[in-house]
Image: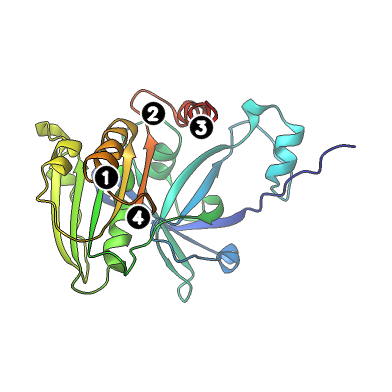
Amino acid sequence: MAEARRAVSTTRLRVLRTERITPHMVRIVAGGEGVASFQPNDFTDAYVKVHFRVPGVTYPEPFDLARIREELPREQWPRMRSYTVRAFDPNLGELVLDFVHHGDEGVAGPWAAAAQPGDELLISGPGGAYAPGEEADWHLLAGDESALPAIAASLEAMPAGVPVHALILVEDSAEEQSLTTKGDARITWLHRSRGDDLAAAVRALDWRDGVVQAFVHGEAGFVRDLRRHLLDDRGMRRDLLSISGYWRIGKTDEAWRLEKQAERNA
């Protein structure tokens, strides 16, 4: 008996407007009729899977990922990328995603740079796992550009007056963004162009007393380094540490997902 196809629901949105918020960050504001079916969650790292059609491939309508994966060869499956929900306003019917754009290579960045009002945006989700909790005496947020939307959303959700250290690695000062929070935040911008090292900066922190909750995401190299440091050297509670490599230098998104899957299965 054939195994039943696992349904993967998708939401079809339309680009409403775009904004280049820094030289390498493009904001996409999407909406349209499909936004009414979007169900937000309470995580500040809430993310959606964005599905990009492969040029020249005809897909079934309505768009059905389970059917696509059953009927089409893998190389024709839509390319999938994960993006943090920077903001969602049900009253305005707007979903905001920020895309890092580093030129013509890749899938999502070039799409976002060229996006025009009316363009299709296919998403599934959201997922997520992290939000600032009240148990912590202070919070640590650390990441690069790929984690910046989640860090920004987390800062906005911080309880009033709670101490926060946020360390963010970007290319240079032009990539810094204005961030808002009710927390007692110390925000440190690190610049790749001058050789700043995010892992070293976290190691050098004047570590506070009390219970810490941490969100550490971005390139897999510094994430692996900081996982050991925070758990072994700092003795952090695992249940209060959200840590994951979003990408790896020299790897496509597909190759990095396969590598992570192999590591989990090892």
Q: Name the residue under label 1.
A: 143
Q: Is residue 152 left or right of residue 176?
A: right
Say which element carries label 3: helix
Q: Which of marks 1 and 3 is nearer the N terminus?
A: 1
The amino acid at mark 1 is Gly
Q: Name the residue under label 4.
A: 240
Q: Can residue 19 be seen in this view?
A: no
Q: In this view, does 232 lie to the left or right of 120?
A: left
Q: Which residue is drawn at 39% across and 39% down?
A: 109
Specify few, some or many for label 4: CA neighbours under 10 Å numbering under 14, 14-19, or 20 or more: some
Which mark is in front, 1 or 4? Answer: 4
In contact (CB < 8 Å): disc 1 and disc 4: no
Say which element carries label 4: helix
Residue 65: x %, y % from top left: 68, 43
The amino acid at mark 3 is Arg
Q: Earlier in the sequence, mark 1 or mark 2?
A: 2
In contact (CB < 8 Å): disc 1 and disc 2: no
Q: In this view, does 44 lie to the left or right of 71?
A: left
Residue 108: x %, y % from top left: 44, 39
Q: How far apart are marks 2 and 3 (CA)?
A: 28 Å
In contact (CB < 8 Å): disc 1 and disc 3: no
Q: Distance between the residues labelled 3 and 4?
A: 21 Å
Q: How far apart are marks 1 and 4 (CA)?
A: 16 Å
Q: Name the residue under label 3.
A: 264
Residue 105 has which mark?
Answer: 2
Which mark is in front, 1 or 3? Answer: 3
Q: Which of marks 4 and 2 is nearer the N terminus?
A: 2
Q: Earlier in the sequence, mark 2 or mark 3?
A: 2
Question: Could you say which quadrant of the image residue 131 lies in?
Answer: bottom left
The amino acid at mark 2 is Glu
